[in-house]
Amino acid sequence: MSFRVAKRAPRIGAEIRNIKLSGDLPDATIAAINGLLLDHKVIFFRDQGHLDDAEHERFTLRFGKPVLSPTLNPAKETISILEIDHPRGGFRTDTWHIDFAYLDAYPKILVLRGVVIPPVGGDTVWSNTAAANLGLPAPLQRLANDLWAVHSNDYDFAVFARATEAEKKVHDEALVFT
């Protein structure tokens, strides 16, 4: 394999360079990417402008069966791609959130492809909760490990800044699970 890996931060993130993503990558390359994802939690690929929705989906399917959103419709001619803040007025994320953690079987990975990157803003922030937990003093770590919580998506989707009527309707009719 001819790609190179550059670590991006002490606890999370690496950039994989010199690779052209596709659904046709050899199994050994997919296995290497998967291993790097497990090690670094977040991986970045630059200069992937050749990916359209179909090729993006073919690449992601190499990592397993997709977890489909129970309430959001996938992009045209795909089974699992969600368009965020697209010009036709679809789903947007302008508040802190965690993707699909409320599902019983949440996704192993999520693949985010920036098609249009704004000149200002558009930031995505990642966190490594496993490293955060391991960095706690032992008494706090034991306390945190013994706590239980029920995660619902009620708050995640209820607090849209400048929520549109359509977003309110999606939340009220579909996103509140009981």
Image: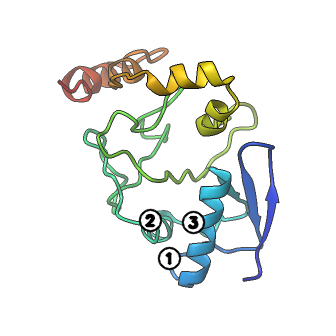
Q: Earlier in the sequence, mark 2 or mark 1?
A: 1
Instruction: For the N terminus, give its image quadrant.
Output: bottom right
Residue found 43% across the figure and 15% down from its top: 159
**Residue 11 occupies which quadrant of the picture?**
top right
Q: Which mark is residue 6?
A: none
Where 61 falls versus 6 (above or below)?
A: below
Instruction: Tell me how far mark 2 sits from mark 1, CA to CA.
Output: 8 Å
Where 3 falls versus 38 (above or below)?
A: below
Do the residues under discs 2 and 1 have CB atoms within 8 angstroms?
A: yes
**Residue 168 occupies which quadrant of the picture?**
top left
Report helix, strand or loop for mark 2: helix
Report helix, strand or loop for mark 1: loop
Instruction: For the C terminus, give its image quadrant.
Output: top left
How far across and how far down the image is residue 117, in percent?
67, 44
Q: Which mark is residue 23?
A: 1
Give the mark toward the camera: 3 or 1. 3
Report helix, strand or loop for mark 3: helix
Residue found 70% across the figure and 31% down from its top: 135
Label 3: few (<14), some (14–19) or many (≥20) C-alpha neighbours in 10 Å: some
How far across and how far down the image is residue 165, in percent?
32, 18
Q: How many marks?
A: 3
Q: On the picture, is 116 further left or further right than 164?
A: right
Residue 98 or 147: which is nearer the viewer? 147
Where 132 falls versus 36 (above or below)?
A: above
The amino acid on which the numbered mark 1 sits, given as a three-letter code, is: Gly
How far across and how far down the image is residue 49, in percent?
65, 64
Q: Which mark is residue 34?
A: 3
**Residue 118 occupies which quadrant of the picture?**
top right
The amino acid on which the numbered mark 2 sits, given as a three-letter code, is: Glu
Q: Which residue is mark 2?
A: 57
